[in-house]
Image: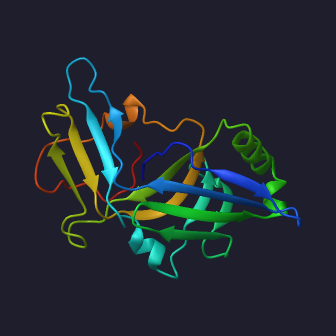
Amino acid sequence: MLHGVAEGGLSVRQEPDGSHILTGRFPYNTTATISDGGRRGRPRKEQFASGAFSYRVDLPDEDIHLLVGHDYGKPLASKLQGSLSITDGEDALTFEARISPEVADTSYGRDALALIGAGLAVGLSPGFRIPPERAVEKAESVEEEDPSQGDALIRTIYAALLYELSIVTRPAYSESQVESRDWDIRPVRRMPTAYRYR
């Protein structure tokens, strides 16, 4: 599975019944540098086009989870359970999650809420896959950056299958996560359909 990361945009409030309402957003059409290219490589940037996550968000029977750190063993909310609502807007993917008192009282629930409250875990990272070319002809592209802006390769994702949103401590890509990617420039880049992490 692939991950993207956005900084900030999370807020939490407690309700009278002991539940917590968590809201957040993942911006579209915003370029993020995911690698500076190292000593000899080229910088790599990435952006999600408006509506990139709409397919699974709009399907009523497809579940999407809110997790802590991409760990399915630490679920906070679920679309199918009615505790997670997601809106795929023009400028961002936004969500509102109702963290039940029972979930908030788990060790990972308490930790997550405390870290968010302290401002230490305010990143939002979507876990997604790129659909196969047979299903979506141009799910993504890689292009040269405008020379007046730099010499990076820019990957634009037009369609992605969203499986989960995660609260993360450090909203940035590490070098090791991008090393395995093929950054050839071509009109449409093919990605393996199997889950993989970056």
Indicate whether 154 appears above or below 133. above
**Residue 21 vs residue 157, the one in the foreground:** 21
Please indicate whether residue 7 sits to the left or right of residue 138 in the image.
right
Residue at position x 81%, y 52% from top?
106
Indicate whether 185 appears above or below 67. above
Q: Position of residue 137 (x, y in %)?
A: 18, 68
Q: Is residue 182 visible?
A: no
Considering every residue shown, the one lying at the far top of the view is: 39
Q: Position of residue 18 (x, y in %)?
A: 87, 62
Q: Where's the C terminus, which quadrant?
A: top left
Indicate whether 7 appears above or below 140. above
Image color mode: rainbow
Please indicate whether residue 161 sits to the left or right of residue 122 in the image.
left
Please indicate whether residue 195 sits to the left or right of residue 125 in the image.
left
Q: Position of residue 128 (x, y in %)?
A: 42, 58
Q: Position of residue 166 (x, y in %)?
A: 57, 52
Report which quarter residue 40 is drawn in.
Answer: top left
For the image, the number of numbered tags is 0
**Residue 57 vs residue 26, the one in the foreground:** 26
Considering every residue shown, the one lying at the far front of the view is: 148
Q: Is residue 193 visible?
A: yes
Residue at position x 80%, y 55% from top?
104
Residue at position x 45%, y 63% from top?
162
Considering every residue shown, the one lying at the far bottom of the view is: 60
